[in-house]
């Protein structure tokens, strides 16, 4: 009887440790609901989800890179560049009949992919440390974003049909439901990422290359190819984030998303991803994004200054990593 009780307590303890990110999220939702009457409203929830779309895209890209054992510090800069390219093309295309948002989106995605390829080449071809390589990319792309507009923000004009479509996409939602179109898009991206990581060779080899690169190489698999693609896809996702951010605020600025890389890394860590590579899931990473988003949202509703928010974020990151350390007795964090 006593042994059965001990086993039950042990199972409960293991379950609590395994799902610590989920428990933190639930606790934050309950606390937010108690602290602010405006939190659990349809308007606030939709606004929160809409605001988190660019960060979610950056974090999903970061997860891919982290799974390979790398890191990408350029995600914020790529978002800024994606937004600048979006605004420039829309303003120029607005004077041309039949201009298509789809064509603009494809160009933006292509540029983000190429930026990611640059980071991947630094890491794979030049054998640079991921931290140094992506720090260089971050600096280069941020500078390029400033150069595209001489350091000035670009506002979308309401004179052109393409601009109007762009703003409608960012600010409106499904008729009758109200779910914002950017949120619909990010749900599709999340589902696609989940499927790729769980059910494709690419997803499995990305995880394997981070967990045991030597074994994967000995199996005759080109690890560098998957590392390279992880950075390239990360760049593409971030440029999509810039596209969506511009549609939401109707303005592109070279200064946006400064520090986004830190939030993306924090969301991955809160979701249980190991910075050593090979460990992390799409579902838990989304939970990490929601945790950080909830902290900012409720403190904004309570009219608390931005500085204390950073302290709270830091404490939650420490708590999440500590719980992971307990869960993983090897503690490779």
Image (cartoon, rainbow, N blue to C red):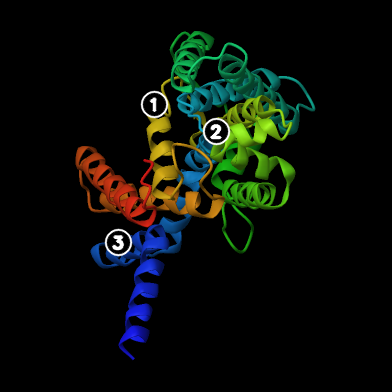
Mark 3 vs mark 1, CA separation in Å: 26 Å
Which numbered disc, 3 or 2, marks the residue that appears first in the sequence? 3
Q: Which residue is mark 1?
A: 258
Secondary structure under tag 3 reads: helix
Foreground residue, 101 or 53? 53
**In the figure, residue 29 lies in which quadrant?**
bottom left
Foreground residue, 43 or 97? 43
- Badge 2 density bin: few <14, some 14–19, many ≥20, Cα 10 Å: many
Mark 3–mark 1 contact, CB under 8 Å? no
**Horizontal and vertical percent position of residue 263:** 39, 37
Foreground residue, 6 or 246? 6
Mark 1 vs mark 2, CA separation in Å: 19 Å
- Badge 1 density bin: few <14, some 14–19, many ≥20, Cα 10 Å: some
User: Residue at point 47% right, 18% down?
Assistant: 138
User: Residue at point 37% right, 56% down?
Assistant: 327
Q: Is residue 228 above or below residue 176?
A: above
């Amino acid at each position: 009887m006593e042994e059965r009780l001990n086993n039950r307590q042990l199972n409960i303890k293991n379950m609590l440790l395994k799902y610590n990110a989920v428990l933190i999220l639930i606790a934050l939702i309950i606390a937010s609901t108690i602290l602010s009457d405006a939190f659990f409203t349809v308007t606030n929830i939709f606004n929160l989800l809409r605001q988190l779309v660019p960060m979610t895209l950056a974090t999903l890209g970061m997860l891919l890179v982290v799974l390979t054992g790398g890191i990408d510090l350029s995600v914020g800069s790529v978002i800024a560049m994606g937004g600048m390219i979006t605004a420039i093309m829309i303003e120029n295309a607005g004077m041309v009949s039949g201009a298509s948002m789809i064509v603009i989106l494809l160009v933006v995605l292509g540029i983000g992919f190429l930026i990611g390829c640059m980071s991947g080449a630094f890491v794979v071809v030049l054998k640079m440390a991921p931290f140094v390589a992506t720090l260089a990319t971050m600096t280069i792309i941020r500078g390029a974003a400033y150069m595209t507009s001489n350091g000035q923000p670009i506002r979308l004009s309401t004179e052109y049909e393409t601009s109007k479509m762009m703003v409608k996409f960012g600010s409106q939602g499904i008729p009758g439901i109200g779910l914002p179109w950017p949120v619909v898009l990010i749900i599709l991206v999340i589902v696609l990422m989940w499927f790729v990581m769980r059910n494709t060779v690419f997803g499995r080899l990305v995880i394997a290359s981070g967990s045991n690169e030597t074994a994967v190489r000995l199996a005759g698999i080109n690890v560098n190819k998957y590392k390279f693609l992880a950075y390239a896809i990360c760049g593409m996702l971030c440029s999509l984030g810039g596209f969506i951010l511009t549609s939401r605020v109707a303005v592109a600025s070279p200064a946006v998303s400064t520090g986004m890389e830190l939030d993306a890394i924090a969301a991955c860590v809160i979701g249980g991803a190991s910075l050593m590579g090979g460990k992390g899931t799409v579902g838990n990473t989304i939970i990490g994004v929601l945790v950080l988003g909830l902290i900012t949202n409720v403190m904004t509703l309570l009219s608390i200054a931005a500085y204390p928010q950073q302290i709270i974020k830091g404490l939650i990151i420490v708590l999440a990593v500590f719980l992971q350390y307990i869960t993983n007795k090897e503690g490779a964090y």
